[in-house]
Image (cartoon, grey):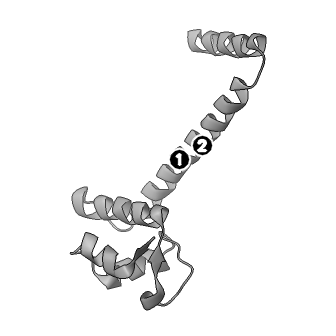
Amino acid sequence: MMKLEAIVTRFPDLEIVELTAWIEQGWIRLESDTPAAWVFDGIDVARIELIYDLRRRLGVQEDTVPMVLSLLDQVYELRATLKAVTGALEHQPAEVRAAVVAALAGADAS
């Protein structure tokens, strides 16, 4: 957990007004509407860093950020789904795993 003061220290050129706009646009989700009560968990801090990098380091325009975030969210969701499928396959009998590998190899050949 990180308080607002720590965020300001970590990102010194990030104005509170800009951070507030990111929250109001739904790019970062918080429980409290009051800046004095803002506490950021690890995922919030990572999201702030991502948006900060998109805007400051990569020069992504503000109106493009929602699309980029949406695409990245989809990639993360796909990764989580693939991890779940892999975990489920690990618990299957060897012949089932072999059949899946064979099916995937066949799909790669076409």
Residue located beneath label 2 in the image: 80
Q: Residue furthest front?
A: 1
Name the residue rendered at 42%, 62% in the picture: 47
Dot label at residue 57? none
Q: Mark 2 is on which residue type? A: Ala
Front one among 49 and 2 = 2
Q: Nearer the viewer, residue 105 or 95?
A: 95
Give the side of residue 53 with respect to residue 35, left or right.
left
Q: Which residue is mark 1?
A: 76
| Tag 1: amino acid | Tyr
Q: Secondary structure at mark 1?
A: helix
Q: In the displayed structure, would residue 51 be above or below residue 98?
A: below
Q: Is residue 60 visible?
A: no
Quadrant of the snapshot with the C terminus: top right
Q: Quadrant of residue 11?
A: bottom left
Res 30 visible: yes
Left or right of residue 51: residue 110: right
Find out whether the residues at labels 1 and 2 contact each other: C-beta distance under 8 Å: yes
Kind of element beneath mark 2: helix
The residue at the point 74 percent across, 26 percent down is 91
Within 10 Å of disc 2 (Cα), the crowding (few <14, some 14-19, many 20+) is few
Task: State the image coordinates of residue 71 (x, y, percent, origin top left).
Answer: 49, 50
Quarter occupied by residue 101: top right
Label 1 and label 2: CA atoms lie apart by 6 Å
Q: Residue at x 56, y 40 (%)?
A: 79
Residue at screen point 52% across, 87% down: 33
Q: Is residue 41 depicted above or below 17 in this figure?
A: above
Residue 48: image x %, image y %?
A: 38, 66
